[in-house]
Amino acid sequence: MQNQNVAYDSKVEGEIIVTQADAVINWIRKHSVWPMPMGLACCAIELMAAGASRFDISRFGMEVMRFSPRQADCMIVAGTVTYKMAEVVRRIYDQMAEPKWVVAMGACASTGGMYRSYATLQGVDRIVPVDVYISGCPPRPEALLDAMIKLQDKIGRERAVKNLIPEKADSAELAGAGKES
Ligand code: SF4
């Protein structure tokens, strides 16, 4: 938690810390990211290594890899996304609850990599919104950890409370729909 988000005066408030709802919600979220390991090719081996003792992704509270989209909030796309798999990747992303994030791990997931072919999607950001890209073929586990730290920074800057309130545009659309009927 950054210092500007916390106010504490022991003489006035005793044991009380004053902060913002955004700061608390984001602090909880960024330290409890549960990855959905979307391992599609060789990059997935590096993803597995990040979970093992040498690199130990649990230092960041992210060791709870979940193969159920209902229990995960960060899809790590590790590997080549073929058109055959693209629909499945999108469906799994849709099944994940909000808020959710996506990391494109490696050249293939980010851009299609060396596979400039009719069978390969040229970047997973064509079907899902990507928050962090990782370069390399394959990227090392340290690169994945670096990306996850960047994702934590991004989560820390989100307007968590504002995002809970429906957009004005949606409200206007709903109002308009009501008038038509
Ligand atoms: S970026 Fe390289 S290591 Fe990763 S899936 Fe593509 S070919 Fe394999």
Image (spheres, grey):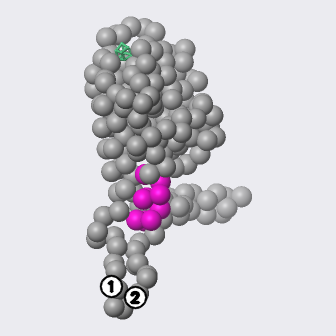
Give the residue drawn at x 49%, y 49%.
32
Q: Position of residue 20 (x, y in %)?
A: 41, 72
Would you say the magenta stretch is mainly helix, strand or loop?
helix
Quadrant showing the C terminus: bottom right
* Amino acid type indicated by mark 2: Glu
* Amino acid type indicated by mark 1: Asp
How many marks the image carries: the answer is 2
Quadrant showing the N terminus: bottom left
Q: Which mark is residue 9?
A: 1
- When the figure is inspected, residue 161 is found, relative to residue 128, above or below; the finding is below
Q: Which mark is residue 181?
A: none
Q: Are marks 1 and 2 in contact (CB under 8 Å)?
A: yes
Q: Nearer the viewer, residue 181 or 89?
A: 89
Give the residue drawn at x 41%, y 78%.
17
- Category of crowding for the residue at label 1, using alpha-carbon neighbours closer than 10 angstroms: few (below 14), some (14–19), many (at least 20): few
Q: Residue furthest front?
A: 53
Q: Position of residue 148 (x, y in %)?
A: 37, 40
Which residues lie in the magenta part?
22-30
**Residue 80 at least partly seen:** no
Q: Is residue 8 left or right of residue 32?
A: left
Q: Position of residue 35 (x, y in %)?
A: 50, 37
Asked where in the image residue 52 lies, by quadrant, the reply is top left
Q: CA distance from mark 1 to mark 2?
A: 6 Å
Q: Which residue is mark 2?
A: 13
Give the residue drawn at x 35%, y 86%.
10
Does dot 1 land on a helix, a strand or a loop? Answer: loop
Give the residue drawn at x 54%, y 57%.
170
Q: Nearer the viewer, residue 54 or 22?
A: 54
Does dot 2 land on a helix, a strand or a loop? Answer: helix
